[in-house]
Image (tube, helix red, strand yellow):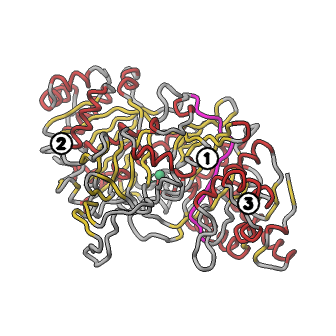
Amino acid sequence: MPTNQQDTAELLRHSMSPKQLEKLEALANPHITDFVAHAIALCKPADVFVCTDDSADMARIRAMAVEFGEERTLSIENHTVHYDGYHDQARDKPHTKYLVEAGSNLGKTINTIDREEGLAEIQGIMNGIMADKTMIVRFLTLGPAQSIFSIPCVQITDSAYVAHSESLLYRPGYEECRRMEGQSGFFRFLHGAGLIEGGVSRDVENRRVYIDLENEIVYTTNTQYAGNTIGLKKLALRLAIRKADREGWLAEHMFLMAAVGPNARTTYLSGAFPSACGKTSTSMTRGNRIVGDDLAYLRVIDNEVRAVNVESGIFGIIENVNEQDDPVIWDVLHDNGEVIFSNVLVNKGRPYWLGMGIETPKSGTNHSGDWHEGKTDENGNQIPLAHKNARYTVPLRNLANLDDALDDPAGAPLSGIIYGGRDGDTWVPVCESFDWAHGVTTMGASLESKTTAATLGQRGVRTFNIMSNMDFLSLSLGRYLHNHLAFGKDLPSRPRIFAVNYFLEDDAGNFLNGKLDKLVWIQWMERRIRDGIVALKTPVGLIPKYDDLSYLFDQYLSKPYSKQDYEAQFSIRIPALLDKLDRVESIYRKNAPGTPDELYEQFAAQRSRLEQARKDHGANVLSPFVFPETK
Ligand code: OXD
Ligand code: MN
């Protein structure tokens, strides 16, 4: 590694063409220069490309993705397809670790490695990793430009696919870095895809995502899958949670939307659901407008909670996107704006995916290479035509339902926060908390959800996932929860907190709700916030009255809603709710010293309300019709 300014200058001159060096030097920022020099000394690239905000540089990145074989063009102009390796289709949690000093207090639920050992390992793997490749250096921002929310970032990668995805997903940041006039304070990401074979990372057993919180650098290697590699996505979220802890704001795994109520009034809602549990489809519900589908920062500004979308694009799950249910995305995927499809089937230049609602071909190319119906993998399992976690990457500006708040440097005023998981048997479809602390503890901090294809490993396993942010926590559970409780405590008016569950099942395992019913839940929340419509008071929170839902189903979905459906969906399942309290409480008691007492107090109160209701009504499962009305 270069140790002084003269060595750094020498190394850069030796490794970069005068034109690329000029772009770097124009930033006049020694912190950036040092990081680039550190990356060059470690990864030893054949050459270096510095990407400014200029459209010619962006076009060069896209062209490189095709030249390097990481993307292939499709029959619609501006559309490409990218494949990740067969065993590199999702986030790798076991190999994602924080570098920590001995005695770290991150707690038992967070994956860590001794700092020196981890740095030696990752730097060993990355030594010379770009030997015959081009290193791409990018500058981007998280959040709107020139805003109190925004964080400048430097991404270094040898994957033109990663760099290209970032053009679609984030705001440019070269000019923002120039304005920093030599200061530090940006997040840094270094990615090397490793040995590439057939356009994909080959050495996935050496896949690593190592996070250096102290220096705000993330190293990632031997993977291309965006959730492991795109610095500004889940890697930055881990750094942002720490920064937010220091500075008194919240960095969340949340969509942000404008719910459009009567007379076109706008009510901003955010929602934290685990990956592949409906964030994108909720923010896209018909008649409402999207601000973002995955990551939000929340700050208190002038006594009001305001939120921004960290991103300016969508890396969305494509499974089940069909023309009827998802018309806005369907159009974007068929227009000639830029799209990167990943891990879909391609036949004659056209992409196909699972659940797209049209007839699909029996052969083509997919994440397994040449594919034909009935093809099996090394374990004899049938390979579907596309991966369940296949994706599309698009800029938000191409969407017809985009809300103006996207680029507001002051963010959107937030009126409601929704927590939701994939829960087959316990929680009602929609419920409002009694107050901030009740919502934070019994909804956000108690969230459980079945695992999905967005992470490697078994699917369908009920897993604790605090605020849907568990995979990205860089703080102890107790500290993170404390921050949430404190965030809303002294505000004159706080966002209401709701919990939703789109995945409730009957005894035969059929979903009790249709895919579009969420539109009704959104409208009910909107009416609670803006009109204070009456609700029913249950032991776990406030649920909708049948008449209100019946009206909203008719208005928004032109569908009758029967009392039987209402009863099946909104019954209070006391044993399941008590079991949930026990399961979640034991996680905090075992793994989270420092958990605020308020959580245990709220749990005890909820438990006694449930037990009292069982006594009062003499049944384990209580119909919603037994509960009294409340404001
Ligand atoms: C995502 C994820 O891709 O959370 O958004 O995995
Ligand atoms: Mn996500």
Whichever of labels 3 and 1 marks the residue nearer the N terminus, that label is: 1
Regarding mark 1 in the picture, which secondary structure is present there?
helix
Magenta: predominant secondary structure element?
Answer: strand
**Viewer-proximal residue, 370 or 503?**
370
The quarter of the image holding the N terminus is top left
Give me the disc on residue 67.
2
Q: Position of residue 272 (x, y in %)?
A: 57, 52
* One can see residue 529 in this view: yes
630 in magenta: no
Crowd band around label 2 with a 10 angstrom C-alpha radius: few (<14), some (14–19), many (20+): few
Q: State the residue position of label 1.
A: 483
Give me the disc on residue 520.
none
Q: Given the image, on which type of amino acid does mark 2 rest?
A: Glu
Regarding mark 3 in the picture, which secondary structure is present there?
helix
Label 3 CB-ligand 2 distance < 8 A: no
Q: Given the image, on which type of amino acid does mark 3 rest?
A: Gln
Left or right: 503, with 313 as reference point: right
Label 1 CB-ligand 2 distance < 8 A: no
Q: Are circles 3 and 2 on residues that touch, CB within 8 Å?
A: no
Q: Given the image, on which type of amino acid does mark 1 rest?
A: Asn
Give me the disc on residue 602.
3
Q: Quadrant of residue 169?
A: top left
Residue range highlighted in magenta: 410-424
Whichever of labels 2 and 1 marks the residue nearer the N terminus, that label is: 2
Whichever of labels 3 and 2 marks the residue nearer the N terminus, that label is: 2
